[in-house]
Image (cartoon, rainbow, N blue to C red):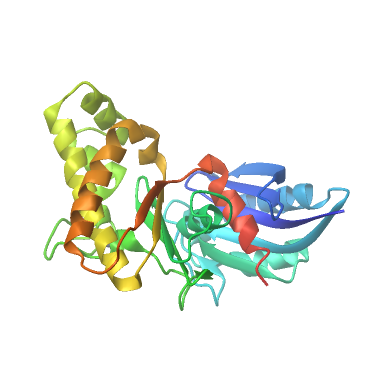
Amino acid sequence: MKNAALAIDVGATKVAVGLVTREGEVLARHDISSKVSSMDELNSSLVEAISDVCHRDGVVLVGAGIGSAGPIDKDLGTINPVNIPHWVDFSLVDFVREVSGIKSVRIIGDASALAYAEFVLGAGRGATNLMGIVVSTGIGGGVVLNGEFHVGRTGNAGMIGHSVVVQGGNLCACGQRGCVEAYASGTNMAKDFGVDNFEAVAAAARLGDSKAVAAIDKGASVLALGLLNAVALMDLDTIVVGGGVMLADDVYWPILVKHFEKEMKALNFPGNVALKKATLGKDSGLVGAGLVGFIS
Ligand SMILES: [Zn+2]
């Protein structure tokens, strides 16, 4: 018999449902679309997916973990995914508990799921104080402190994208001004360059377009400032960076490293802080949600 956790990863356009072992192996997987016309339709396809993956021979279910776009409320078990209007303030934890019969169901932010997966199985192995961040259409993060997964009071610790680094700066999607995300997300670097997506910025930068390089430089410099603040506040030893923007790490990574090293020189206490690329790839959100299901 194998121990496994039910893992649910709520993404922008789909919900991945799987069975994940403690070693990060995905034993079963059933994805459903979240682009549906009603909450009933979404919920019935979730019930089908859960019952499909849960009924596997030779597997003992030890718990369940849910990773979702934030903000979440870990005590109420609710999510507020911007892209899934049917699930605004929906208590996904209660729903999953009822449908699956699993008592221990934990919910975390999607970026926290990646951070935790990288800490346990990926680039963050061996770290003690780690922040994992996702640089994509938005910017999220998750935190491990003193070797323990740290989710904070409401479950949203590590939300570095909405830390403010420019007073009265650019308007962010969250309504504040001057957030890290308002400059450093893939979407906002693309906006700065005047295109729709970050792939187009990266492609132009590869051809030596100086405006594309400048847009990446601006975004990376603001993110480095956010990371400096995180290191100063939490005395981190490791930062792991993942997300869609890292698919263009050939152009993005050297620029981020340059700014990060410059910022770290100005901080007088931490010594070496390791800045690392995430290694677990696109399943890391699902795997992280599953690993959280093992935490009792
Ligand atoms: Zn914001």
Q: Is residue 25 above or below residue 209?
A: below
Is residue 263 rendered to the left or right of residue 270?
A: left
Using the rendered view, name the quadrant where residue 65 is placed.
bottom right
Quadrant that contains the C terminus: bottom right
The residue furthest front is: 271
Q: Nearer the viewer, residue 170 or 275?
A: 275
Q: Is residue 182 visible in this depiction of the protein?
A: no
Looking at the image, which residue is at 19% across and 58% down?
Answer: 265
Question: Of all residues shown, which one is farthest toward the top?
Answer: 207
Q: Position of residue 71 (x, y in %)?
A: 43, 65
- The image position of residue 277, as x and y in percent, is 41, 44
Q: Nearer the viewer, residue 30 or 239?
A: 239
The answer to whether residue 24 of the structure is visible from this angle is yes
Please state the horizontal and vertical placement of residue 9, each as a whole percent of the image.
57, 52
Occupied quadrant, residue 217? top left
Picture residue at 39% right of the left edge, 62% below the top? 237
Q: Residue at x 50, y 67 (%)?
A: 89
State the residue in front, 20 or 9.
Answer: 20
Image x and y of residue 119, in percent: 52, 57
Which of the 4 image quarters holds residue 290?
Answer: bottom right
Give the mark count.
0
Left/right placement of residue 244 relative to residue 211 reads right
Q: Is residue 173 left or right of residue 11?
A: left
